[in-house]
Image (spheres, helix red, strand yellow):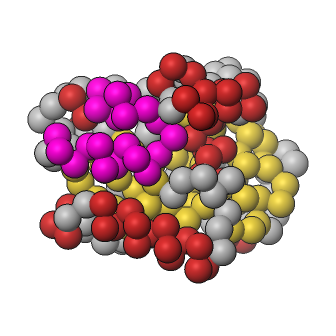
Amino acid sequence: MTAPATNGVSSGPSVPALKEWAVVVRALLAGEQIVDIRKGGLREDGRRFSVTTDRCWLSPTAEHQDAALLGAAYAHWIDLAPGSPAGGPVTIPGWAEIVDVATVTEPDQVAAVAAKSIWSPEYVASRFRWKRRDPLTVLVLRAHLLDEPVTIPWRDEYGGCTSWVEYADLPADPADLASVPALSDGAFAARHRGVRSALSDECWSGPPTAD
């Protein structure tokens, strides 16, 4: 559906959107993975990635997608997840609760993180090496698929290499829309335990606190 300009829609939404490859958003909403691995975009505040919200819209983008950077079993998913092209309407298929956050600072932790995503280990390692002084951030996401995707018009400020986008013309809280979780409570809890156990306790900071 196309988001209207009224009826509970916020002109300055309180819940931001996490911009990510469309193929990764597809994996999150299909329950194929529950993590996202971030380093921060060139337009990030302070040039570093940070988490200031406990839930977010999932905004699939076609920018930078490359089948060669995915695990072999997932390379064909590129064709199934075209994403919203820059300059065109933005379609939001779902949202996520951010239930846990970890910081990865050591090379020997990277392989454990990569095994939890559809990216290739080599690509995750390259993300770790880029801006080596900055850590990788691992988000554990409880994804929810909207019953009806929301489409909003493009604005120039939505473009560029940044992780978080504040879209106008969206409901203030994605939980107000009809949606279903990608995984059952039990399945998600089991996956979450597996991700937690892949990294040492000192890596984890727990769920974020929304501003």
Res 129 visible: yes
| Residue 109 coordinates in the image, percent (x, y) | 22, 48
Q: Which corner quadrant holds the C terminus?
A: bottom left
- Residue 8, given in percent of the width and then of the height, sits at 75, 65
The furthest residue to the right: 1
Residue 175 to residue 84: above or below:
below
Q: Residue at image x 44%, y 61%? A: 140
State left or right for residue 106 relative to residue 169: left
**In this image, 22 relative to 42: left or right?**
right
Q: Quadrant of residue 52?
A: bottom left
Number of marks in picture: 0
Q: Which residues are magenta?
A: 107-126
Q: Could you tell whether 117 is left or right of 6 in the image?
A: left
Residue lying at 40% horizontally and 47% vertically, measured from the top left: 115
Residue 77, relative to residue 9: is it above or below?
A: above
- Residue shown at the point (67%, 27%) measured from the top left: 76
Magenta stretch: dominant secondary structure:
helix
Q: Position of residue 177 (x, y in %)?
A: 76, 67
Q: Position of residue 13 (x, y in %)?
A: 58, 56
Q: Quadrant of residue 2?
A: top right
Q: Is residue 73 left or right of residue 37?
A: right
Is residue 118 found inside the magenta-colored segment of the image? yes
Query: Does 201 sit above or below residue 109?
Result: below
Name of the residue lying farthest toward the bottom: 186
* Residue occupying image coordinates x 29% and y 32%: 125
Which is more toward the observer, 49 or 143?
Answer: 143
- Judge whether residue 174 can be spotted in this image: no
Return the residue nearer the eye: 16 or 95. Answer: 95
Magenta stretch: residue 73 in it?
no
Of residues 111 and 57, the one drawn nearer to the viewer in this rendering: 111
